[in-house]
Each structure stands twice: as C-alpha cells, then as structure tokens.
Image (cartoon, rainbow, N blue to C red):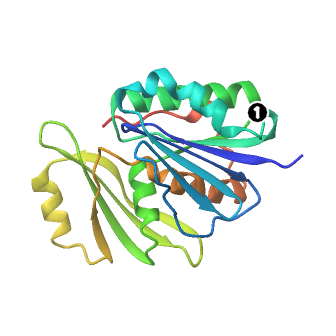
Amino acid sequence: MTKHGLALHASTPELGLAIACSDNLSTGLLEPNASDQTRGYLHKAKRTRVWDLGRETSNLLHAYILEFIAPQTWQELTWIAVAHGPGGFTGTRLAVVTAKTIGQQLQIPVYGISNLAAVAWQQQIEGDVAVVMPAQQGQIYTGVYRTSHRHRTIEVLKIDRLTTHTDWQEYSDKFSGSKIILASGAKLGSTVDSVWDLAQLQWQKGELSTWQNLTPFYG
C-alpha cells in the first residue's frame, strides 16, 4: 500500500489541501485552473486544491477533505500536516482540532507548520527571508527564516511572534537578508503546498511529531 501525506490549511478564508506520496519530493510549477471559487494545482505526484470558502469553512471542511483525498483512503495516510497559525482564531482552531483528531484516530504523526514559515518557503529563496503579516489592533506577526531549496533545509532565525511596527522597524533596518515578504493575512490557502513540503522534510528526517504536541498559535 502506497503511503501518503496530507496537508491542511484553513487559518484564513481560503481552504487549502494537498496530498502526495510521502516518499516523493515536490517538483513543478503551480497551474491555476479557470474557476473563480476553487484553484487546482498540478505537481509531480502531488494534488493541491484551494477553495475560497470564507466563513463557510467550518461547515464544509470535513466534507471537502473526504472528497479531496479520494481515491486515497484514511488507511493510506502516513502523516498529516496543518498550518497552525498565526491566523484567524476560528479557522486555525478548526484546522488544528481536525488534524489532531485524524492523527489520534489513525495513530500517525501530526506536523504543525507555521503560516509564516510556509510563506517563506513558497518564495524559493536561497538565503534569509523575513515574513511580516498584519495582525489586529495595529500589530503584526513576524518571523525570520534561512531557507535553501537546493539543500531542502529551513532554519528559524527569529521565531514567530506578535509585535509592534516600531519594534519590527528597528529589526528590519538592520536586516541584511535576501528579502522581506509582506504577507496578506486574508488568503494564504495556496501555501498549503509549502505546508506539505515542510512536513515532508520533517518526516524524511525521522521527526515523528505527535498530536499531543500540536498547539495553535493565535498570537
């Protein structure tokens, strides 16, 4: 039986799902389809879909997962990954609870992946990447990473945190990395592809994260 990894992103109004053989590496370019409400992406040995569900995510999430994983079955999942924040409270909580429940029932590893790390990885940059995302009350989420797609590694240089524009400005003035990414907190479903990739890196290293260790990051 071929084993697959499943990635879930629902901490913004977009729902993103990705599935692929857990022994494969991700390659290829994203190719959006013609639909306004849903976008499909074709990768070598990977299926990725993104739906713009808005507030309907909580009502439709489980049905969409069931439809999406076919023709694979639950028994074919070897791990599950979830974007665990920072993001909207309801969507992030729902996604994390869903991933933890699946992991517990199937007794498979559950990987929590930072939204900011997924954005950084999506840039395909060799070097240091800073990610900034709007938060509430005039604050921002920030995280800094060192990424290498050539060596398939990611290192956290500055952990995700909720901070002020003033504090971030002081840091960014000294930042000498490759790029600073201003991420929109509204639609990040397409980064589910990176969520899958980052979980796959952990899986291949033998890091077996359990559902008990997963907590959402709301800021």
- Residue 174 appears anywhere in the view: yes
Against 5, residue 214 (above or below) is above
> Which corner quadrant holds the C terminus?
top left
Mark 1 crowd level (few <14, some 14–19, many ≥20, 10 Å Cα) = some
Q: Position of residue 93 (x, y in %)?
A: 44, 27
- Residue 199 appears anywhere in the view: no
The image quadrant that residue 120 belongs to is bottom left
Report the residue that reaches farthest toward the front: 34
Against 127, residue 38 (above or below) is above
Q: Position of residue 195 (x, y in %)?
A: 53, 52
The image quadrant that residue 99 belongs to is top right
Q: Residue at x 43, y 75 (%)?
A: 125
Residue, disc 1: 74
Against 211, residue 78 (above or below) is below
Report the residue that reaches farthest toward the right: 1
Q: Residue at x 9, y 55 (%)?
A: 166
Q: Is residue 102 left or right of residue 167?
A: right
Q: Amino acid at mark 1?
A: Trp
Q: Residue at x 41, y 68 (%)?
A: 123
Q: Position of residue 27 (x, y in %)?
A: 62, 69
Label 1 sits on a secondary structure element that is helix
**How many tags in the picture?**
1
Q: Position of residue 67 (x, y in %)?
A: 65, 33
Q: Nearer the viewer, residue 2 or 135?
A: 2
Q: Residue at x 66, y 56 (%)?
A: 46
